[in-house]
Image (spheres, rainbow, N blue to C red):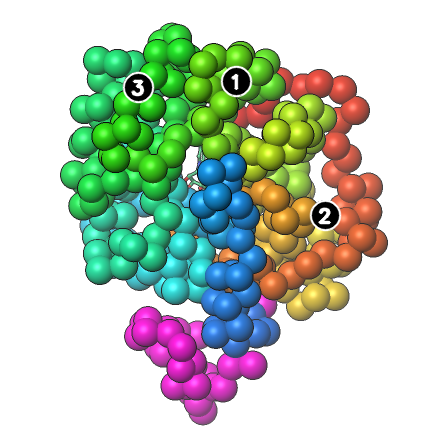
Amino acid sequence: MFLMDDRGKYSKYIYNLSFKGIFNMNMPKSINHDLAEIAQKNRLSRIKLADGASVPRIGQGTWFMGESAANREAEIAALRLGVELGMNLIDTAEMYGEGNAELLVGEAIKGIRDDVFLVSKVYPHNAGQDKMAASCEASLKRLGTDHLDLYLLHWRGNIPLAETVDSMEKLVEQGKIARWGVSNLDTEDMQELTRISKGTHCVTNQVLYHLGSRGIEYDLLPWHRSRNMPIMAYSPLAQAGSLRKGLLENEAVAEIARDRQCSPLQVLLAWTIREGDVMAIPKASSLEHVLENASAGLIQLTPEEVWKLDDAFQMPSWKVPLDMI
Ligand code: NDP
């Protein structure tokens, strides 16, 4: 447990973390483990990609970060604390703030680049042979690094998938990216992609997935599982519940949160990663939110809890088009 001083602040008991800002923050009620334990658990429970690289089950999103000078310091602090707590996969995109999120991430990872699994995404209209190299170069420059650990096609556009695969493979050969993947591709798109020569080099598909949006469980997630290609779940917190009315107030979610003395959002996050083979990338811009999300990595829902949530939010028993935002 945390040791607190008499003003309710964290004490220096948090010996493992070099992150100083933590000593001045108030502890969310939902945190009932010490930081070293949270960091260790998140660093140990990882997911293997097909090429052997390992990534944390909980990473960090950055959409809407870097858009306000007033929030800059807090956002950088949040990302750095997240890395220390083992959420050391950071997801960004050239689209986010038209490069401003990448600039912010670049600042956040200064001095800790080697400890971060860095992911960025290319716009569909830049995902062809004449533009992708320049897009990637610009992302690298904004991020202050010489390579990305993973580069994703943000969504499918008009450029043929085969051309995107060729361009991605060239970037791998040049050492600009270590591997590549896609985002927002439904099952038929994935089948088409993997029929293309070297299309099977794709390591992940980043898609919308949260308790209130379970369409991928019908066929996309099983397809990925059968190929050992993990899904990366975006908006795992349903954007703090706003993507599905009544999600956080639902009795099953609330009851589990009450029993476990955690927050409904932690239940959502624990649910998304419950099987151990889905990565989730919640976005949080405060230390308190980062701490809560990181500590959700210690919550292993019981089969009874999962059934309760299944009952409240059933997966579809027919094909639904891929949900996206
Ligand atoms: P999330 O589901 O991650 O929710 C983010 C929201 O939840 C923010 O408002 C955040 O507030 C709030 N929040 C985070 N943690 C807590 C907490 N512990 N308690 C209360 N509120 C909390 O939504 P996103 O849409 O941001 O998805 C995550 C990431 O996925 C994106 O940032 C992006 O990197 C990626 N993404 C990819 C897409 C794609 O097309 N490939 C599409 C959408 C997202 P605050 O910021 O104040 O902490």
Name the spot of residue 90 as percent of width and height, x first. Answer: 38, 47
Q: Is residue 50 above or below residue 112?
A: above
Measured Cα–Cα span from mark 1 to mark 2: 39 Å
Q: Residue at x 39, y 64 (%)?
A: 84
Whether residue 302 is visible to the viewer of this picture, yes or no, is yes
Q: Is mark 1 within 8 Å of ligand 1?
A: no
Q: Amino acid at mark 3?
A: Ser
**Sequence order check, earlier mark of 3 and 2:** 3
- Rounded to the nearest angstrom, the CA distance separating label 3 from label 2 is 45 Å
Q: Which residues are magenta?
A: 1-30
Under circle 1, the secondary element is helix
* Residue 85 percent location from the top left of the image: 44, 64
Residue located at (54% from left, 48% from top): 47
Q: Position of residue 162 (x, y in %)?
A: 40, 11
* Mark 1 lies on residue: 194
Secondary structure beneath disc 3? helix
Q: Nearer the viewer, mark 3 or mark 2?
A: 3
Q: Which mark is residue 167?
A: 3
Q: Is residue 22 magenta?
A: yes
Report whether residue 287 is seen: no
Of the two numbered discs 1 and 2 on the same chain, state the one appearing first in sequence: 1
User: Looking at the magenta stretch, what is its main secondary structure?
Assistant: loop
